Amino acid sequence: MHRAPTDLLALATRDMPLPPGGGLVFVRVGGGLAFDLPEVIRRCAPRRQATFAAGRMAARDALRKAGHGGEPVPGIGGDGLPDWPAGWLGSISHSDDIAAALVAPDSGAQLLGLDVERIVTPEVAAQIAPEVMSGLSLGRSGQPPELEVTRTFSAKEALYKALYPLTRQFRDFSAARVGWKRAGPGDPCRVRLTLTEDWGMDWPAGTTFEAVQRIAAGHVATILWR
């Protein structure tokens, strides 16, 4: 039986360690609209409207799954970030026809980030590796190059999504380096990220984070929280 990529990702990530009280949801882009779009989004191209709507529906469903009362759809806050309900953290990601959202009460997490990426082709991996890998030699992890590059890209994107709402500071891929951690059979893949430079006053160079990843339906899903 054919299963949608969103279903396969939901199945693959069901045992990922979420923040206390957290919820993670995947939805299909273009699956319909259950709320009015903000005016600024209604002026965008149809594809942008569809991805925005799917991301917000994923956020609504993730909040519901995590036990938030009501069914809020996060609006648009400062810097274009989602305007999460008071007392909640969240992160939204889009890839192809997939949207996903991770939420949790801020009583159990200081930061969180989510990223979903389609695994790139070997040709694309070779092109973007110098920037994404930030000086590390491709192939050191023993993974296929396209998977290593995609996993690195996704881990660093999740880190950015976790830190930017706190710092409002951009950084490029060289701001963190990755280290691969062995996982047991059936366990989620784990990636250690170490800052190579200060990222705001509270996150100096040398600070480490751990991201958890699952690979399914030709995609890498990454969550990072602490």
Image (tube, rainbow, N blue to C red):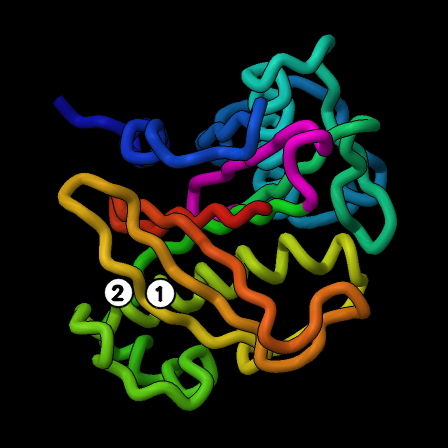
Mark 1 touches mark 2? (CB < 8 Å): yes
- Of residue 31 and residue 109, the one placed in the foreground of this image is 109
Read off the residue under disc 2.
147
Amino acid type shown at disc 2: Leu
Tell me the residue at 56%/46% (across/down). Answer: 225
Residue 6 at x, y percent in the picture? 36, 32
Tell me the residue at 42%/90% (across/down). Answer: 135
Residue 67 at x, y percent in the picture? 62, 13
Amino acid type shown at disc 1: Thr
Read off the residue under disc 1.
150
Q: State the extent of the magenta-drawn residues as a range.
A: 94-110
Q: Is residue 106 left or right of residue 114?
A: right
Q: Is residue 106 magenta?
A: yes
Categorize mark 2 by other alpha carbons within 10 Å: few (<14), some (14-19), many (20+): many
Q: Is residue 137 magenta?
A: no
Tell me the residue at 78%/45% (across/down). Answer: 43
> Could you say whether the residue bearing mark 1 is in a helix, strand or loop?
helix
Residue 38 at x, y percent in the picture? 81, 35
